[in-house]
Image (tube, grey):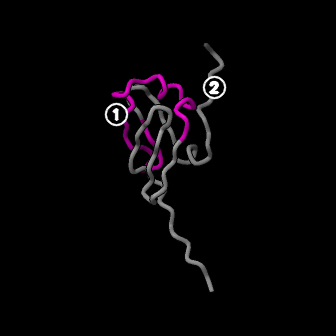
Amino acid sequence: MGILALSADERVSNVTFDAERLIVDLFDGRTIAVPLAWYPRLAHASPEERDEWEVAGAGYGIHWPRIDEDLSVEGLLRGAPAPQSSSK
């Protein structure tokens, strides 16, 4: 007897924030919550800048135009923080 595998739909349906986390809802019902500190541009952005996001990459990414930040669902699912800049 086989098990039917549900098709995962990893496209972004919504993005929200709380005091410490970036929260991304996917169309397949999953929610990814990661520490906001992992993404310094988002952590230092104003609430208005964070709220201005758009779906990118055919639904598999998120873009914040006012702060020039891009994240992928794949990276969020892997738990990949933003690369650290070597210059200060």
Quarter in which the N terminus is drawn: bottom right
The disc label shown at residue 84, or none:
2
The disc label shown at residue 13, or none:
none
Residue 82 picture location, percent across and down? 59, 32
User: Which residue is at the far top?
Assistant: 88
Q: Is residue 21 above or below residue 6?
A: above
**Residue under the point 63% across and 15% down:** 87
**Residue under the point 34% across and 33% down:** 52
The disc label shown at residue 52, or none:
1
Q: Is residue 85 above or below residue 22?
A: above
Quarter in which the C terminus is drawn: top right
Q: Which contiguous range is marked in magenta?
A: 34-63
User: Which residue is at the far bottom?
Assistant: 1
Q: Which residue is nearer to you in this view: 1 or 58?
A: 1
Amino acid at pointer 1: Glu
**Residue under the point 56% across and 44% down:** 76
The quadrant in which residue 56 appears is: top left
Q: Is residue 49 left or right of residue 78?
A: left
Q: Is residue 60 above or below residue 54?
A: below
Residue 30 picture location, percent across and down? 49, 55
Q: Is residue 15 left or right of residue 39?
A: left
Amino acid at pointer 2: Gln
Where disc 1 sits, the SS reads loop
**Residue under the point 49% across and 26% down:** 43
